[in-house]
Amino acid sequence: MHNKTLTVLGSVNVDHLIQVAHFPQPGETLLGHHYQLVYGGKGANQAVAATRLGAKVNFIACIGNDDVGRQIKQAFIQQGMNTEAISSIDGESTGIAMIQVAESGENSIVISAGANAHLTAQRVQSFTHIIQQSDALLMQLETPLEGICYAAKLAKTQGKQVILNPAPAQPLSDELLSQLTMITPNETEAEILTGINVVDYQSAVKAAQIFHQKGVEIVLITLGARGVFVSHQQQQEIIQGFSVQAKDTTAAGDTFNGALITALLEGKTLNEAIHFAQAAAAISVTRLGAQTSIPTRQETDDFLAERK
Ligand code: ADP
């Protein structure tokens, strides 16, 4: 067996979901239904995915000094995650997302970063040893960019693999891009970062070229139900995903990213790792919610055996 370690750096959120007939007008009070509290945050989702799928995971994150923060941390510990780099911030609340889901299927979301805003370069610096002891660093864009840039540079200097899932998308410096081993945008994020509207193989090749020119070795553009476009050195192809009855695609990308790096750290080839990650992500879209939808290793191996 392998004993490689992954560090995930990113956000922790509590999602407050409520179903509404329509979005309320200013001044209107509306009766919602089916209120649910679900653990989310892209960083947490990816750390949970990698842990459930068998990776040894350190999670660098910030939670509030509140009950829900403590409960979330406890849930991470129970699943086997190393939580020593999760800081509890006094006087701050754990990050939240207030999500209204209308009958039309549209979402309306208000986010409060809360403790996530405290994941600064200075705080990341105090966890230098965690990054030094890992083999790969996986990040997203829901925490301050300065902390992400600091961590990327540190990890790259130490010869670690640096993977960025650039979600939610925002413009990034060439300096940050040049530190990345791999970038994993979806089609929308790829367009925001490259200006290329990714609609087919040709446009994906063009977008990937832009990332490569800025120094990113491996580009994976996830294409939802259509699979994944992969580009590195001489290989450029679309790898089909699995056909499933989709119920809720929340955390599909997060499950994909956590699973992908787990498989790569086990020594699987890139194509094998993509295949494994697409299986885990396909299972997640058949289930509701964020962390509630992420499968275990056994469930993923069984699914792969069935679909062979
Ligand atoms: P994001 O959630 O970040 O927008 P995608 O929607 O591209 O990311 O999904 C990531 C991966 O999850 C896809 O590459 C695919 O493997 C899988 N996936 C997403 N939606 C579906 C679906 N409807 N059916 C099967 N697999 C899916």
Image (cartoon, rainbow, N blue to C red):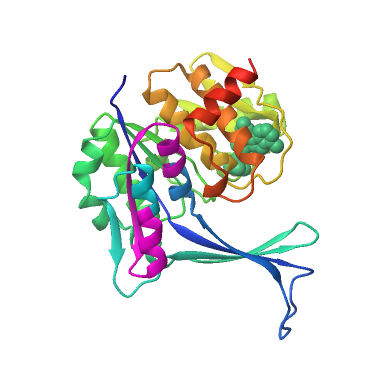
Is 17 rendered above or below residue 145? Answer: below
**Quadrant including the N terminus:** top left
33 and 261: which is toward the camera: 33
The residues colored magenta run: 47-74
| Residue 186 pos. (x, y %) | 60, 39
Is 171 rendered above or below residue 240? Answer: below
Which residue corresponds to the image point at 72% horizontal and 83% vertical from the top-left?
29
- As for residue 129 lying within the magenta part, the answer is no
Q: Can residue 56 be spotted in the picture?
A: yes
Which residue corresponds to the image point at 71% horizontal and 32% vertical from the top-left?
244
Relative side of 262 to 65, left or right: right
The quarter of the picture where residue 66 lies is bottom left
Which residue corresponds to the image point at 63% horizontal and 19% vertical from the top-left?
306
Q: Can residue 222 be spotted in the picture?
A: no
| Residue 82 pos. (x, y %) | 29, 44
Q: Residue furthest bottom?
A: 27
Which residue corresponds to the image point at 43% horizontal and 46% vertical from the top-left?
173
- As for residue 68 lying within the magenta part, the answer is yes
The quarter of the picture where residue 116 lies is bottom left
| Image-quarter location of ligand 1 | top right
169 and 15: which is toward the camera: 15
The quarter of the picture where residue 6 lies is top left
The count of marks equals: 0
| Residue 131 pos. (x, y %) | 25, 40
Relative side of 130 to 205, left or right: left
